[in-house]
Image (tube, rainbow, N blue to C red):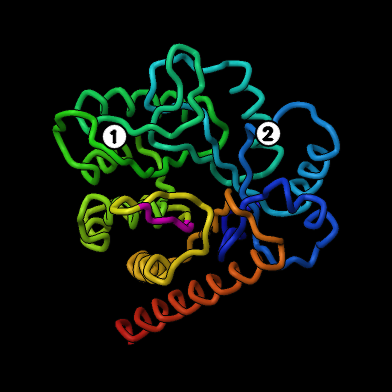
């Protein structure tokens, strides 16, 4: 299985849909994304269903708890199990969040932002390089949402992410909705922000819904994707000039499978239109 198979808009494999997805081979979803923490190890019927789907369909893996920017040592047993799982699924890469999730061996179950300092960048680069050396597939790091600045910064978010990606020499899982949400909360132009970034490192994108609470916008993964976020995805695909897999995330207020498939199809149509326009533009330039 090569990464050429991972085009279009996929879905996260979620527990409410396991029974139906296992029965429906003709679901039309080009790939699933799964969190290894939810599948690695032994389990009952739900675990067996998930493994059957992952053995049948193309899979990308996305971690939640590695705490790349943290200070806790790696869980060596889990790393071994993770490596075996990545090889089993045939995923072309494994993604983690550019954040910290653990303190003193306690998992906080939150994606917490790192300070935008040179020291934090150096530390995270070293951790990411070490993690990459322990994985059997390339590592991607994902930009997260954050809702407060962590003290005095040496750089802004764009410079921090770019510094870590370039310094660690890893790929980028570009979360389009996270860029949009941060842009609303901190008052910047998301297209100008993306224009500063190393888009050549993008191997995958995420897209999701969010919700406004007064003056604050929260990345909830609990609503349909709005048109401006879809348009930002299309703009980014045009800038890339190449297809990359896009993952539609839905983790809260999860609709039934048919409703989610309908939204996926809508975003797939927007994806196809952007890619077709990019190809036409490239052909016109070389005509």
Horizontally, residue 136 falls left or right of residue 73, namely right
Horizontally, residue 229 falls left or right of residue 158, namely right
Front residue of 133/274: it is: 274
User: Which residues, given as a range, are shown in magenta?
Assistant: 207-213
Instruction: Categorize mark 2 by other alpha carbons within 10 Å: few (<14), some (14-19), many (20+).
Output: some
The answer to whether 66 is drawn above or below residue 14 in the figure is above
Asked whether 250 falls inside the magenta stretch, the response is no
For the point 23% across and 30% down, which residue is it? 150
Where does the image place residue 13, in percent across and percent down from the top left? 67, 49
* Residue 90 marker: none
Q: Quadrant of residue 135?
A: top right
Name the residue that disc number 1 marks: 167
Q: Secondary structure at mark 1?
A: helix
Number of numbered callouts drawn: 2
The answer to whether 208 is drawn above or below residue 159 in the figure is below
* Residue 85 marker: 2
Where does the image place residue 97, in percent across and percent down from the top left? 44, 37
The answer to whether 127 is drawn above or below residue 147 in the figure is above
First in sequence, mark 2 or 1: give its number: 2
The span from disc 2 to disc 1 (Cα, nearest Å) is 27 Å
For the point 71% across and 62% down, which residue is it? 257
- Marks 2,1: beta carbons within 8 A: no
For the point 18% across and 28% down, which residue is it? 151
- Of the 4 image quadrants, the one containing the C terminus is bottom left
Instruction: Categorize mark 1 by other alpha carbons within 10 Å: few (<14), some (14-19), many (20+).
Output: some
Front residue of 224/239: it is: 224
The answer to whether 128 is drawn above or below residue 262 in the figure is above
For the point 23% across and 56% down, which residue is it? 193
Asked whether 208 falls inside the magenta stretch, the response is yes
Front residue of 174/163: it is: 174
Q: Secondary structure at mark 2?
A: helix
Where does the image place residue 142, in percent across and percent down from the top left? 42, 43
């Amino acid at each position: 299985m090569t990464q050429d198979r991972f085009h279009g808009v996929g879905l996260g494999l979620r527990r409410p849909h396991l029974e139906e997805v296992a029965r429906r081979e003709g679901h039309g979803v080009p790939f699933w994304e799964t969190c290894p923490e939810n599948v690695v190890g032994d389990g009952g019927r739900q675990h067996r269903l998930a493994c059957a789907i992952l053995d049948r369909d193309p899979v990308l893996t996305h971690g939640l708890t590695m705490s790349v920017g943290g200070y806790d040592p790696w869980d060596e047993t889990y790393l071994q199990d993770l490596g075996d799982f990545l090889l089993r699924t045939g995923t072309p890469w494994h993604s983690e969040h550019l954040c910290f999730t653990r303190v003193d061996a306690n998992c906080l179950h939150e994606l917490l932002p790192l300070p935008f300092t040179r020291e934090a960048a150096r530390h995270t680069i070293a951790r990411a390089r070490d993690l990459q050396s322990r994985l059997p597939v390339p590592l991607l790091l994902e930009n997260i949402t954050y809702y407060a600045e962590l003290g005095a910064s040496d750089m802004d978010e764009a410079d921090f992410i770019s510094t870590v990606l370039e310094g660690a020499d890893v790929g980028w899982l570009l979360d389009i909705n996270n860029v949009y949400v941060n842009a609303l909360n901190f008052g910047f132009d998301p297209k100008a922000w993306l224009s500063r970034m190393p888009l050549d490192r993008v191997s995958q994108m995420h897209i999701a819904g969010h919700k406004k609470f007064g003056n604050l916008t929260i990345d909830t993964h609990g609503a349909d994707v709005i048109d401006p976020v879809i348009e930002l995805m299309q703009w980014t695909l045009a800038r890339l000039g190449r297809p990359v897999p896009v993952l539609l995330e839905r983790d809260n207020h999860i609709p039934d499978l048919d409703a989610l498939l309908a939204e996926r199809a809508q975003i797939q149509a927007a994806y196809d239109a952007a890619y077709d326009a990019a190809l036409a533009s490239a052909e016109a330039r070389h005509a």
